[in-house]
Amino acid sequence: MPMGTPIEINDTLKISYERGFPIQFNLKDGLSFEELEKSIKNKEFSFWNKDERLYHRAPTPVLLVQEMPDGKWVHWGRAQIVEQTIKQGKTEGKFIVSKLFSPEDRFIITRNLSPEGKSHF
């Protein structure tokens, strides 16, 4: 019988709209940077991911990445995990956005930090 744990430690919260990515974050016809910042200030968002994942807890930030329908990544900023529950095969929790990247930074960071072939840009 193999030993070990199926729990994965993550420094990146990568989720899709279906798994709780904020709908305000939209590359097409979205809010301006300033409007988006105002709309998410002090707001908690819920998320879930399959598999058992342990995210760094606040005050340590994690990268906030949107997983696009085609599997590509967009780095939107940093988040703080304020709550998480790990059950067999699934992780659920809540986060706040602690830093929103400007559109220019979002482009550069996504291109530089995404795994090869995963950058949306």
Image (spheres, rainbow, N blue to C red):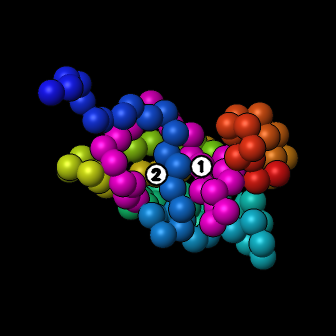
Q: Which residues are magenta?
A: 47-75
Q: Residue at position x 82%, y 51% from top?
A: 121
Q: Residue at position x 68%, y 54% from top?
A: 72
Which numbered circle lies on residue 65?
A: 1
Three-letter code, disc 2: Ile
Point out residue 42 in the picture as x, y percentages from the top left corner: 47, 56
Q: Is residue 58 magenta?
A: yes
Point out residue 65 in the picture as x, y percentages from the top left corner: 59, 49
Q: Residue at position x 56%, y 40% from top?
A: 63
Point out residue 83 in the picture as x, y percentages from the top left corner: 30, 48
Q: Nearer the viewer, residue 73 or 20?
A: 73
From where the camera sits, is residue 97 visible? Answer: yes
Q: Nearer the viewer, residue 1 or 114?
A: 1
Three-letter code, disc 1: Val
Label 1 element class: strand
From this viewpoint, which residue is outermost toward the front? Answer: 1
- Inter-mark Cα distance, 1 to 2: 13 Å
Q: Nearer the viewer, residue 28 or 90?
A: 90
Q: Is residue 52 left or right of residue 113?
A: left
Q: Is residue 86 magenta?
A: no
Residue wearing tag 2 = 96
Q: Is residue 121 left or right of residue 79?
A: right
From this viewpoint, which residue is outermost toward the top? Answer: 3
Point out residue 90 in the picture as x, y percentages from the top left corner: 29, 53
Q: Residue at position x 54%, y 62% from top?
A: 16
From where the camera sits, is residue 109 visible? Answer: no
